[in-house]
Image: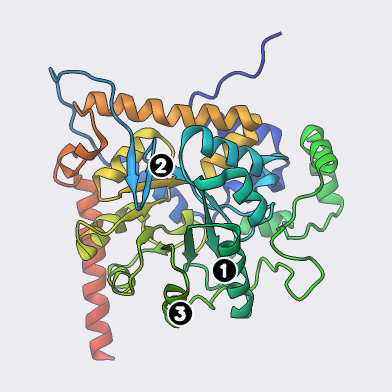
Amino acid sequence: MSGPKRIISFEDAKVKAKRRLPRMIFDFIEGSAGREIASNKNLQIFNDIYLRSKVLAPFEDPKLKSNFLNYSFDLPFGIAPMGMCDLAWPGADTNLAEAAKKFNIPHCVSTAASSTLEDLKKWGEDQTWFQLYVNGPTQEAWDMVDRAEAAGYETLILTVDVPIVSRRVRDLRNGFVVPFKIGLKQLIDFALHPNWSLSTIIKGIPEPKNFRQGSKNSFDRNASRAGANWEFLDELRKKWKGNLIVKGVMDAIDASRIQNAGIDAIWVSNHGGRQLDGSPPALLALPKIRDSVGPSMPLIFDSGVRSGEDIVKALALGANFVMLGRPIMMAIAASSEKGLNDYLSLLKEEIEVVMAQLGLKDLSKISGDVLYNDISGTLQMEIDTANRVEHTRSIINAKS
């Protein structure tokens, strides 16, 4: 009897994940803010960008090594921070740490991870970065920073786009809360997916292990994370001696101010559309932020990336490195460790194919020149529309 079939596309992983997971868990991974307009636009905008293929170029195996900050990675993408990954399938945190080492890519560990930041650093070694939420009193955040430093983390990511958790309609409909509250609806949902349910019971119901449930440091998913303000950022920069990245930036003015604060890299993201449903596609913000901070400021990008071709497009529009979150969770949900390895291999293969079509043999050659126009017509129209909106808003503000 043959084993599980290999995942050959993101859509493949999504279909399998939906079949394996209880609806509440699938919707937690797939769902977004409000009517999910921002999430859908994140995806659509990639379809509206065209690449310039080249012919008769000498073919060589593309070189995908990526130097970012003080790291040398084998690929230009990594694993974004995601809370409660073991919900996708028991043991996901371990799978992610092992895959990051195998593929030599970064693994960003969430404050709300299913495992402690100390265990994840031990499993993932030098590939592991820590992502910080400022939940509740800032002293708790400083305690988390001290733990990260003691565990040997060299790179810290401060997420700044969650002043409060948005209304995620799917979660509200399904009764998704942390820790779980199991009612009749949830029991029926779990009973219809016995493999996930039994595996989860055997391994233990996931919880945010960096917090002690029932104590003053327990995790409240709906708590404000607004403690991450400009003053906190300045103090964090003084305290943290390693690499400091600010994640969730969509505004060029904010990006310039963050750059001036001495931050090592800016992460352009609209949280995958999970925070502000009226947000523009993150890819739309990327070239504007690149123009604002100049060519030398390291930029990370996420939101809407599903394929190797998407990664190339993000690099062409100004990113130095790309991260993926939701698709990684889908791959694990689809086929556990095998699904994750299949998907990461797929992304690598797709990048190689696209680079060959573009006549490129080195990542460093990816630039705006590979776009069919300097910037695709659709994207330019989006930018023009956004500029007109900003101009109108400034006139209204001036009159008020």
Determine crowd level at label 1: few under 14, some 14-19, many 20+ residues with C-alpha closer than 10 A. many
Residue that badge 3 annotates: 235
Residue 362, given in percent of the width and then of the height, sits at 24, 32
Look at the numbered discs 1 and 2 and tell me whether their residues touch, using CB distance below 8 Å. Answer: no
Residue at point 79%, 32% (across, down): 195
Q: Secondary structure at mark 1?
A: helix
- Tag shown at residue 77: 2
Closest to the observer, 26 or 85: 85
Residue at point 73%, 60% (across, down): 177
Q: Which mark is first along the chain, 2 or 1? A: 2
Give the quadrant of the C terminus: bottom left
Residue that badge 1 annotates: 145
Q: Which mark is first along the chain, 1 or 3? A: 1
Instruction: Give the alpha-carbon distance from disc 1 to disc 2, as whole Å.
Output: 25 Å
Q: Secondary structure at mark 3?
A: helix
Instruction: Give the alpha-carbon distance from disc 2 to disc 3, as whole Å.
Output: 29 Å
Left or right relative to 285: residue 104:
right
